[in-house]
Image: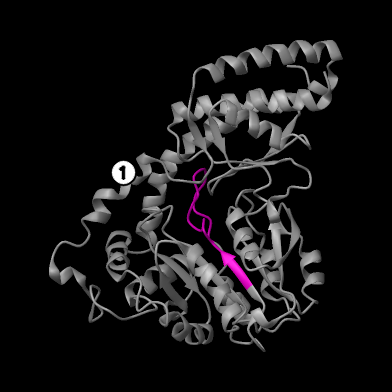
Amino acid sequence: MKKYTEMTREERQTEYAAVKAAYEAQKAKGLQLNMARGKPGKEQLDLVTEGLCNALTKPEDFMTDGIDARNYGNVDGLPAAKRLFADVLGCKPEQCFIGGSASLQLMYDAIAKAYSNGMLHSEKPWSKLDTVKWLCPAPGYDRHFKVSQNFGMEMITIPMTATGPDMDMVEELIKDPAVKGMWNVPKYSNPEGVVYSDETIERLASMKPAAPDFMLMWDNAYCVHEFACEFKPFADILSLCEKYGNADMVYEFASTSKITFPGAGISVMATSVANQEYLKPLINVQIISYDKVNQLRHVKFLQDKEHTLALMKKHAAILGPKFKAVLDALDREIAPLEIAQYNRPVGGYFVSLNAMPGTAKRTLALCKEAGVTMTGAGATFPYGKDPQDSNIRIAPSLPPVEELEQAIAIFCNCLKLAALEKMGL
């Protein structure tokens, strides 16, 4: 297979005609395929349904640590749920605040409290400040950026490297007291699949930001989500921050969204006891307690870290072939042409692809015409603006392998068409 850059104009025209014909044939099938979000597939949901739904059957099952999970109270969650998340994350139970099905809600709520009341070390509520700046490693998680944008923050893009965010840049920017926080997905980052190096984590934990209320937002969404390797232990960021005198700086988040049910799971915000004591009364104004029955259901089903990791191996057996289907197609159809670079993740939920600059929007527009829905171009950057119009996030988890193979075949043809158009015909 000849590289596009080595083809003559006539050869590119011939190639374009052939790829266009294949694309039109695919479009004529009227397919409706979705690779837009990192949703678990039906097989994964079926994997946990019976065990989770039948975890509580008798009245006595709802009692734990002398607490009736069916009643009011315990805004910060059941002690048993705290112990479960502490076991998985490697922190302490008293550092865990248990929420509902979405860790994103806890993230949003923490920042909302900073704006309405200020955080533990704030001089005043952030809403009273002239400017709030926020560090955003990119490509990154679009929903993080939407939270920052919702509050009117000035988002600053931090380039991602193979070992995590550009720390030289981070350490320079935090000298500005208006820089109040930073998003992080430290393990199998969304969408790059990067695992932060030990050095990067140490540098983050030991930072001395000018802002006394700086929030290191540690979204550990994929902490146990390997699919092509054995479980990789990860540093406890809370202990590291405490070691460097930054115990109150870090807020770690995780959930069972991709372990049990995304729409009916439980989540955690792990942070210092001092932060917990400051935030609990503020949160208690808006809610008396999250769904403790669901918390207990998850405790009974997942039990501990060991059982959770055993379940994740079953998830991996389902996810592994899906990622292989995507990577095999890219290796076969795209790599020899040298029109894109892509990561080879061993965990998480995404494949990140960098197309020829200036072609991501066109590629995804062609995909949409052919019935393939994907995350919009630019979504992985602050304000939805990819300066290179290059990054594309592929989410292989939802479709069955057969549908996925059809979708990635269409995607490859769209990538080729966009590249050939950009090169000139």
The range drawn in magenta is 216-233
Above/below status of 293 relative to 32: below
Q: Quadrant of the N terminus?
A: top right
Q: Quadrant of the C terminus?
A: top right
Nearer to me, 157 or 57: 157
**Residue 231 in magenta stretch:** yes
Residue that appears at 56% across and 20% down? 27
Say whether residue 364 is left or right of residue 305: right
Say whether residue 214 is left or right of residue 422: left
Residue that appears at 81% across and 11% down? 11
Residue 8 in view, yes or no: no
Q: Residues within 10 Å of mark 1 (few under 14, many from 20)?
A: few
Above/below status of 265 relative to 247: above
Residue topped by disc 1: 46
Write down the quadrant of residue 101 in the picture. Answer: bottom left
Q: Main secondary structure of the magenta part?
A: loop
Could you tell me the amino acid type at mark 1?
A: Asp
